[in-house]
Image (cartoon, grey):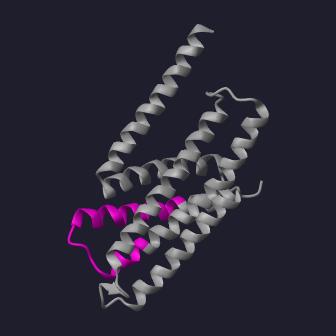
Amino acid sequence: MRHNSLTTIINYLLIILSLFWSMIFLIYSDTLTWKGFKLVTQSNWLGIFSTWTGLVTLTFFIIKSIQKKQLLPYHSQLKKSILQYVHTHHILFGVTTFITTLAHGIYFLIHSSEKEGKLITGWIGFGLLILLVFAGFLMLYRMKRRNVQRIHRWLGILFTLVVFLHAGGWQITFLLVTTIVFIVILSMQKIKAYYQ
């Protein structure tokens, strides 16, 4: 299935933006501004973009899991279409997450942060992301698919938790709301199965 053009354009723009700012961070490593732009602000924006593309990737995984287990009733053609979209865009958003996270980390590698906790969770998150991407590549080449898929899934969940610890604040609230909604959906499914 081909990528949705708007989704592809947004992801490619984020990748180009990430590569551009990475180059600026490296070339102007001795300064905190470039042409009136605060470099830390640009790095933080890249961090926000990587968080959201990571969340979208995880959401695609959750939707795919729900659909495969037939927890939500959809017409079979619609279900097939959703699963194809989710699979195709999961990889694209995963690549975008990796590149934007790398660009975000380059700035803080050059200009160490005063907040040691954020630096530590950032490094842990980046290490998990590298392992996540590696497991994703193994899955693309069908190597021990079932075991690698399980590892990829758990790495994704751990990465998401570390990102929330790293970012903090409103994103933790979002995680709690998402978890509650997910539990409500599963509960509704169990109730429905009980009465059938």
Image spot of residue 45 (x, y percent): 40, 67
Rendered residue at 30%/89% (across/down):
31
User: For the point 49% across and 65% down, which residue is it?
Assistant: 130
Quarter placement of the C terminus: top right
Total numbered labels: 0
- Tell which of 87 and 11 is nearer to you: 11
Which residue sits at x=72%, y=47%?
Answer: 84
- Image coordinates of residue 194 in percent, x first then y, are 56, 11
* Residue 79 left/right relative to 124: right
Location of residue 170 with respect to 129 vertically, above or below: above
Vertical comparison of 184 with 95: above or below: above
Question: From the viewer's perspective, is residue 147 above or below residue 49?
Answer: above
For the N terminus, the quadrant is bottom right
Res 141 visible? no
Q: Residue furthest top?
A: 195
Horizontal relation, residue 70 to residue 40: left or right: right
Magenta segment, prevailing SS (helix, strand or loop): helix
In the image, is 139 to the left or to the right of 14?
right
Residue at 34% over, 84% down = 36
Instruction: Kindly tell me whether residue 95 is visible in this rendering.
Output: yes
Magenta stretch contains residue 109? yes
- What residue span does the magenta drawing correspond to? 104-132
Q: In the current view of this chain or complex, which residue is farthest to the front?
A: 36
Q: Is residue 117 magenta?
A: yes
Q: Give the image location of residue 117, x and y in percent.
A: 24, 62
- Residue 79 is left or right of residue 109, and the answer is right
Q: Quadrant of residue 180?
A: top left
Residue 195 image-quadrant placement: top right
Residue 30 spot, x, y in % from top left: 31, 91
